[in-house]
Amino acid sequence: MAKDLLKLSGLEIAECIKNTEVSKDEVLSFFRKRIDSIDPRIKSFVEVYSEPVKTLGGSNLAGVPIALKDNICIKGKRISCASRILSSHISVYDATVVKRLKEAGLLIAGTTNMDEFAFGSSTESSCYGPTRNPWDLERVPGGSSGGSAAAVAMRLVPFALGSDTGGSIRQPASFCGVVGFKPTYGRVSRYGLVAFGSSLDQIGPITTNFIDCAYLLNVICGFDEHDSTSSRKDTPDFTQFLRKDIKGLRVGIPKEYFSAGLDREVESALKEAVNIFKKQGAKIVDVSLPHTEYAVATYYIIAPSEASSNLERFDGIRYGMRKDASALIELYKKTRGAGFGDEAKRRILIGTYSLSSGYYQAYYMRAAKVRTLIKKDFEDVFRSVDVILTPTSPAAAFKIGEKTKDPLSMYLSDIYTIPVNLAGICAVSFPCGFTRNNLPIGAQLIGKAFDEGTLINAGFSFQQETDYHNKIPVINM
Amino acid sequence: MVDKKTVEYVANLARIDIREDQKSRFTDELSRILEYIDKLKELNVESICPTRGAFTEENVLRPDRQKKKEYYTDILNNAPASEDNHFRVPKVI
Amino acid sequence: MEYEVVIGLEVHVQLATESKIFCSCSTDFESKPNTNICPVCCGYPGVLPVLNRRAVELAVRVSLALNCKINKRVYFERKNYFYPDLPKNYQISQYELPLAQNGYIILPSLKKIGIERAHLEEDAGKLVHKGNYSLVDLNRTGIPLLEIVSRPDIRSADEAFDYLNYLKLTIQYIGASSCDMEKGYLRCDANISVRRKGGDILGTKVELKNMNSFRGVRDALLYEAKRQIKCLDEGKKIYQETRLWDEKLQKTQIMRTKEEAHDYRYFPEPDLPDFVINDDLIDKERTFIKELPIDKRARFIKDYSLGGREVDVFISNPALADFFEKTVEEFNQPRQVANWILGPLLELINSLGGGLSKVKITPANFSKVVKYFTEGKLNNLTAKKVLSLSIEDDRDIDAIIKEEGLLQVSGEDELLSFVDEAIKSSPKAVEDYLKGRGQAVMFIVGQVMKKTKGKANPKVVKQLIEGRLKEHG
C-alpha cells in the first residue's frame, strides 16, 4: 500500500478512498510519516498541522491532503509569508481558495516555505532558512513557491498551491520536475492571498501531472465577489481537456526565448519537446515576441511599486511583530527595519523610488506603457498560433548561495516567465527532461487569456508520451 | 546612479530602518538595478497608453448591505498593544 | 492699503450608505470603539476592496446637484502615507481624474461659487490623544466620503459660512447625507490668502484645519485674514503652512507636527477595475434632485412675500417648510401663517424638545388656529392656549374652543363689568395712568385678561379702560 500511494495521482488516491481500498486516515498517516522522516532534509514545510484543517465537503478529490504556500490565509492558522514581521500572525479569515478547498473535501496538511513575501526565485530569502531541492540538496528548489514545489516533487503531499507573480509557480516547478500552472489573471480569487504585485499575482496548482492539475483548477477557479479583479467568465470543466489529441495544434516557438544565455542542455531538452509535439500532430510555427528583452526591466518597476504599497500595512499597530518605541515614526522604522529581510527591503526601496515624486513618470508610467507593448506582442502572436512553447528557465536549478550576492542576476533568470504575468495570460511549466546531473528541466506552454483548456490538452498529451513526471527524487537518508 | 542620501530619503518615505553598515551595499545594489531598468529608455512610448492594472471586468460593484459584526473580537485580540478596546500607539509627534 | 481675502474650502461629506465604501461593515454611528470593523477595513494581509454601488450613486447625485461635469470613466488611486488611523497606510482615493469637475453653487446673495472637483474616497479612523500615547478607533475607517473642493471664489468669512450652509442644505435636500457636523459627517478645511485689492496674483496660501462648526470656520477665517493682513502691513512674510484653529483661544496656531510636504506617490489602484457611469445612472440620480434650497428660497420669497431671514428658517428646516406650505393651502394668508409658525409654534416646539417629531398637530388643524386668530375669534393668548392643547395629539380645534369656552369675548357689555372690577382693584395703576404714564393701562388690561381667563379681546378692553379712566379723570 505504501508504495502504491507514492505512485498514485491525487485523483487516484481519492478514488481509492471512495472505494474504501484505503481510509482517509491511512492516507493522511502515510504522507505524515513521509513528511516527518524526509522534510528535515529539504525543509519544504513551514508548519505541518497535527490535524488537517477541518472540512465538511466532498468532490472528486475529497480526502486527499494538500499543502498551501505560507501566503494563503487560513483562519486560525499562522500565516507568515516566511517573514519575521508576521512570524506569529494568526489569520482571522479564510482565503476564498481555502473555502473552496474545504468545500471540496481536501485536507490542508500545512503551509510551505517561500521567499519572504514572494520576493525571490530561490526560496533563500525565507526567514526560516532555505528549502533544498530534493534532486540535489545543495541546490535551490526555485522560488518563490519553492516549498510547495519541493514537497510535491518529493511526494510529501500529492499536490500543493503556490502563487505566481513573475514565475513563482512555474520556475520552482521546473527546478523540481513537477507541473506548475499559472491561471489567467482573474481566474482564481486573490482574496486571502497576501498581495505582492496586485496586477500580477495569481494562485495556482502545483501537481505531478496534468490530471490532478485540471481537477484542482476546477476547485479553485471561479468568480469571487470578494475580489473585484476576479473574472465573471464561466469556468469550464477543465477535465474535459484531458484528451490525447492535439492534431493541428499550432505551437509557436519565439526566437527571443532561444537566444544566447540559454543553457545548452535546456535547449536540447526543449528541442526534444518540440519533436514530441510534432510527432503528435502539432504544427510548429516560428514566431517573435519583440519586446521580450524589456520584460524584466518592466516587471522590476511595476512589481516592486505595487509591493511597496501593499507592504505599507505591516507597521506593528494592528497585528504582527512590533518593536516598541517612544514615538510613532520610530515605531514604524524599527518594526519594519527588524521585520523585513534584505530582499524585501530592496524591493520596497525600488518601488518607493519608482513611485516617488519626480520619478513616477520616468519609471512607473514608462513601465506601464512598455507593459502595453508586451501584451500586444502576445495578442499579435496568438492570431497565428494556439500556444507558445518556451523553456521555463534559462538553466536548471542553481546552487544555494550562488546568486544571492547579485540580486540583478537573480532577477534576470526570470526572463521567460515574467512576460506572462505582465500580459495577464496563462502558462504552465512541466518536466521535459533532465540534465547530466539529474536535475529536472522544465518546458513552458503559454496560452491565450482564459484558454487554460488548450494548455491542459497539450500538457496531458505530452505526458502520455513521456515519463519525466513519474520520476521521484531519491534522497540518501 | 543613486547615492546614499537618496537611499536614506527613500527609506524614510517607506518608514524602514536600514543599518548603517548596510547602506552602502543597498546603494550599490539599487544603483545597478536602476541602471538596468534604464534600458526602458531605449523605447519610444510617447503614443502608447499605459496599462492601468490587469482588469478583465468593468463596473464591479456590490449592493449596499451590512454584514454581521463577526470579526472585531479576533481583530482586537491580534493587536500588539491595546487599551480600552483601542489600538495603542506611541505619541504621534 | 485695501486688501482682498481669497478663500477656498475643502469639504468632506459622509455619504448616506448602510455599509462602508469598500467592505460591508456597518456605517451606523457607533460609540463602542472598534466594533464596526473587519479584515478589509483594518488592512489585514490578503484583503481586497469591493466598491459600494450606493456610494457611487450618491456621489453622482451630489455632483449633479452641484452642476458638475461627470467624468464617465471612474477609477481610483492610492494615496500613500503612514498614519495610525489609516490601516493600509494608503488611502484609496481619486487624484488625476475625479468623479466630477467644474460645477458651481449659487448663494442667496446670487454669487456663484465654483466647484473645482468632487471625488470619492475612504475615510480614516479616529485618534484619541492621551499625553504621550494615542489610541486608535477604526470604526470610521472606510466610511464613504465625497470630497468637494471649491474654487478660491469666496471673498469673506461670511460668504464662506453661506457657502457651507448652502452646500450642506443642498446635499441634505437630495438625501445624499445627513451632514451632521457633530457626528463628523461633514468636515471642512479652508485655504486662505490675502492680496492687494485689485491684484490678480494670489497671495501665499495658508491651510486651516480643526474647525468643528460652520461658525468655527467663519471665526477662524476672520482671525486668519486679520493675522495675514497685519503681517503684510508690517512687512512680515506669510509662510505657506498649515495652521490649526483653537476654539478656546480663538486663534490659529502652526501645526507643530508638520513635516515636509508629503510625497503621496499616487498610482492607479490595481485592486479596483474602472467603473463607467452611463446615462441611465445619471438620469436615475437626477430624479432625486427636486427643488434645490436656493431655488426654494427664491420661490418662498416671491410666492409668499416673506423676508429673506424668515425664509431661511424654513429653508433650514424642510419639514417645517412643508408644514408651512400645507397650512397655507388650507388658509391662504402666508404672512399670518408664517408669524404663527415662526413665533408660537416654534416656541412650543422648543419647550417640548424633540423637534418637529413631537408635533402631532396637522396643518389642517393648525390652519384653523391661524384663521380664528386672524378673524378675531381667538386672541393672542387664547390662540396660544388652543395650540398648546392640540400640539401633541392633534385635538380638534373647534372642539377645544367649545369645551374650554375659549372664544374671544369682544362685546362691550360683557366686558364692562370686568373692566370696572379691574379698575377698582388696581388703584396704583390708575393713579400712574392719570399722572401721565400711559403704559400703566396695560396692567389693568392684564387684570381683565386674568379675570376673563384670557378670553377678552385685549384691544377692546384697553379702549374700554381708557374710556372709563377718561370719564373719571
Image: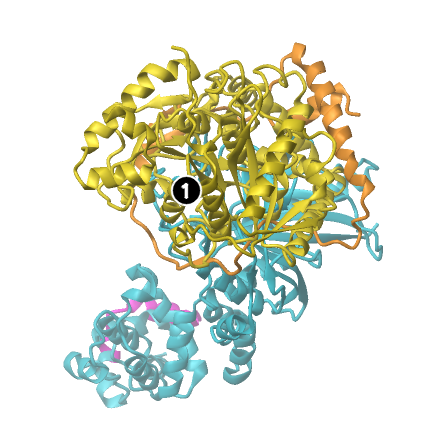
Q: Chain of mark 1?
A: A
Q: From which residue to which does the magenta span run? A: C419-440
Would residue B3 be found to the left or right of residue C320 on screen?
right
In the figure, the shade used to draw chain C is cyan
Q: Nearer the viewer, residue B77 or C102?
A: B77
Image: C93 above or below C136: below
In the rendered view, tell whether residue B48 sits above or below residue C455. Answer: above
Q: Which chain is orange?
A: B
- Residue ID at (40%, 80%): C337
Q: Residue furthest front?
A: A279
- Locate residue C355: give its quadrant: bottom left
Q: Position of residue C103 (x, y in %)?
A: 65, 65
Question: In this figure, which residue is indicated by the disc labeled 1?
Answer: A213
C424 in the magenta segment: yes
Residue C168 visible at all: yes
Instruction: Identify the image quadrant of residue A356.
Output: top right
Chain whose colour in the figure is yellow: A
Q: Give the left or right position of residue C6, taking residue C198 as reference.
A: left
Q: Is residue B36 left or right of residue C447?
A: right
Secondary structure, magenta segment, majority class: helix
At mark 1, the secondary structure is helix
Residue C441 placement (x, y as % from top left): 36, 73
Q: Position of residue C430 (x, y in %)?
A: 33, 71
Looking at the rendered structure, the kind of residue marked 1 is Cys
Number of dots carrying numbers: 1
Q: Nearer the viewer, residue A110 or A215?
A: A215
Locate the C terminus of chain C by quadrant: bottom left
